[in-house]
Image: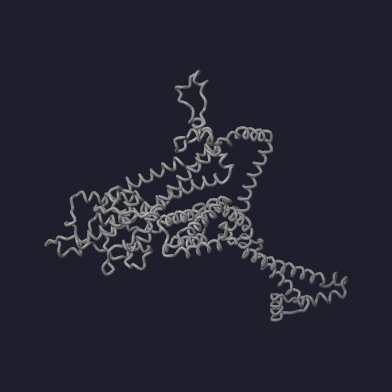
Amino acid sequence: MAFLFHSSTPSYASEQLSSHLSSLSTSPISTPPSQPIVASSSTSTNDIKAKPAHKLQNALHELSSSRSISKEKLVEVLESLVKTEQNGITIEEKSEIDQEVEAEVLGRAVTIVWKEILQTLVEKALELEEERNWWDASLNSTRGVGVYLLQTMPHRIYAALPPRSKFLRPELKAFKLPREALFKPIRTRTSATLISITSPFNLTRREMLSSRSELSRTRDEIAQKIGILASKGPNWSSDSTSTNENSSTASSSPSSTNGVFDAKSETERIFKVLYNVLELESVQPQLQQATPVRSSSSRKSKRTPSPPTTISITTTPSSLIDILRKHLPKTTESIDKVLTTHKRPSALTRLWFPALFLPPTLYFIASAISRNKEWMREQVKNGKETIKGFFVQWVWEPIEDIAKTLRGGGEGLGVAPTTVKSDQESLERMVLDLGRDYYHLSGPQLDALGEKVRAGDMEEVLRVYEKEMQSPVKNALLGSLVRTLLIQVQKTKTDLSLSLLSLDHLLRSQQLTFAAVGLAPSLLVLYGLGGWLQGVWRGEKRGKGRKRTYFNGLRSIERLLITSPKHAQELSEKDRGLLIVSVSGMRTWATGLSGNSRESFMDDLRMVEDPILGRGDKLRVIERIWRCWGVEGTRKI
């Protein structure tokens, strides 16, 4: 049953984290020369040979593991380093190896924090995109708007009712349900007037458009942040030409001397990017001056940059813990508020009207079952016996036969070799007696006759038989005719025994093959059933929904590449974030694929995400996906 468990496809953030940590492991790291190291007489000669502190060594070991580290484990490692800082150890008291190990630990930690923020934002953007697609599907038809109005009508009426304290008989008689209370007010002073002259259908459509617009706006904001994280992410490669970032990252790359990176400056640069993405006020003015975020309004009007504000930012374990425990949850909470307010109605709201027909449907079904109780019981019994017979007689028993054949050599016709040997010896004695009595043979002549009989040559007996047949009645009474006939019967019996013995050996040698052939049909049935269940579990057999997800996802990626500014050599941060979100949705879809199909499809998606490829090259990759995978994602042209 191992096929029921399948591994999900790796996310964009996970693959980028693995790449960045690999680059960090292979890049020579140095600490800033501005940090002096106080050498004493006891430690000046042993700094190189000394080992790093135990806490730093454990932290580096945890963060260098080949398996992905969870957010909780990262917080635990950072808290151990915070306790070390609280012991009062200053930078001047740390040895050179401690400073180098601490620089790599902080570099790995900030890279993992970068991955956690990127992964969280991508997941939230996918949720927003999923809700937005639901609104789009409902707005595409008049029926969808009408169904939504019918589904939400109980909530609207309940929200428009007065408080329970006003449910008195006089007031209840005079109460009239105001129309404007059923719909969200328009953002103008004459909302009641507009609502009174607008049809309920148009008001419902306006609400749906408002929710979709709010989800789109929030998704675009998150995509902007994802684009910033992707374009200004970690750059631990010592070779600037081999980096996978765009040209804007080169200006912010860490300083290097002879291929040796200053780990602290790169760590602080990533830390500032994280603060910029999380919109923390302590560094926001400085980062807006350094890396302004372009939007649709900023492309049209030029803003005068404000003077830079010098704020010192130091990457410490406590600041990384604050990001993971305080700032990132706040960002997630703000996105969840938008989702809660503008997401699709709940399942109960969408299904309350069809649920009205559930009781009568159940009643009719129960009545039909009660009327045909005996027939239903018989069919259930037959089905159980059929399934049991299949697994017992066509699967389990053939497997047992194969095991017995492998263990005991199988079973043949039951012919004993001693029986064949006895028949041969009896035939030989009968022929020798005939030769002694009829031909008067003795000594070597009898031995030669015995050799002929053992070789199967019955010429001497047939000569006697042919001669005796000249006078069959006389020789049957007085001659050797009956004797030669009995010898030939013994010869036939011996040949039959030999044939049966050979057939017995053949059956024993081929019994494993016969057992496997008998088991093959049931194995084919189980294989087909297992493949079908595997496809259902992974999502390959989910029909139109899966095909629609593939088709719409690929179309959104292609539309994004086509509508991006053609004069720009590279995608903007917002467009790149939207591209990463769309491709992440296709990564989730690729979980339903198996084997080499998944890997080849994932390679194409990685090429779409690759910032080195231009917009035209990515469009060619999309064309190849359409060509190789078709319009339904089934690899059927």
* Colour convention: one colour
Q: Does 446 appear above or below 159?
A: below
Residue 295, image x, y percentages: 40, 53
Quadrant of the drawing holding the C terminus: bottom right
Please indicate whether residue 86 sits to the left or right of residue 601 in the image.
Answer: left
| In this view, 501 is above or below 334 | below
Q: x and y percent of residue 299 in the render?
A: 40, 55
Give the residue at x 14% y 63%.
Answer: 44
Decide if residue 324 is in sight here. yes
Q: Which of 349 and 159 is in front in this view?
A: 159
What percent of the width, then of the height, locates residue 557? 49, 57
* Residue 143 falls in image quadrant: top right
Q: Residue at x 22, y 51 (%)?
A: 84
In the image shown, does 342 or 286 lie closer to the viewer?
286
The extreme bottom residue here reads 444
Left or right, residue 50 beside residue 23: left
Task: Pick out the residue farthest to the top.
Answer: 170
Residue 98 percent across, percent down from the top left = 22, 59
Q: Quadrant of residue 524?
A: bottom right
| Residue at far left of view | 41
Count of marks overlaid on the render: 0
Q: Can residue 7 be seen in this view?
A: no
Q: In front here: 426 or 282?
A: 282
Pick the front one: 575 or 266 = 575
